[in-house]
Image (cartoon, grey):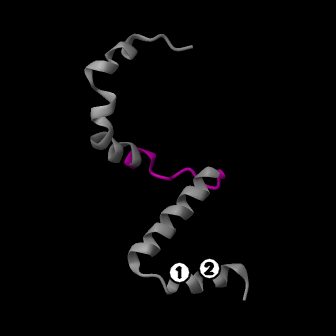
Amino acid sequence: MNVIESIQDKINRLPEPLAQEVLDFIGYLGHRHGLWTDFGEENLIAAQDDTMYHLWDNPEDEVWNDVQTL
């Protein structure tokens, strides 16, 4: 059995939610190694917006809005 067949065998025995995690990880690896660029970055950014809004937009951090970048 080659590596691909071994991976397929293990994936076939996973429940659907775990198989989805494997698929997500494969996408991450492909993107990280430049194999493909369609990783859905815009979806990831949109997904984190609601969660991170309170960290990005608060009175304590307003001072950083005017910092010059290089």
User: Which quadrant of the rendered structure holds the C terminus?
Assistant: top right
Q: Tell me if label 2 and label 1 are in contact, CB under 8 Å.
A: yes
The residue positioned 26% from the left and 19% from the top of the image is 59
> Is residue 66 placed above or below 47 in the rendered structure?
above
The residue positioned 27% from the left and 24% from the top of the image is 58
The residue positioned 60% from the left and 57% from the top of the image is 30
Does 28 sit left or right of 53 as displayed? right
Report the disc number at residue 62. Answer: none
Label 2 vs label 1: CA separation? 6 Å
Does 39 sit left or right of 3 as displayed? left
Magenta-tinted stretch: 33-43
Residue 38 covered by magenta stretch: yes
Which residue is at the far right?
A: 2
Residue kind at label 2, given as amino acid type: Ile
Secondary-structure class at tag 2: helix
> Is residue 46 placed above or below 25 in the rendered structure?
above
At label 1, counting other C-alpha atoms closer than 10 Å, the crowd grade (few under 14, some 14-19, many 20 or more) is: some
At label 2, counting other C-alpha atoms closer than 10 Å, the crowd grade (few under 14, some 14-19, many 20 or more) is: few
Residue kind at label 1, given as amino acid type: Ile
Report the disc number at residue 11. Answer: 1
Q: Where is residue 3 in the image (x, y as percent from the top left)?
A: 70, 79
Looking at this view, is 40 or 16 the one in front?
16
Report the disc number at residue 7. Answer: 2
Q: Where is residue 10 in the image (x, y as percent from the top left)?
A: 57, 83
The residue positioned 56% from the left and 50% from the top of the image is 37
Magenta region's main secondary structure? loop
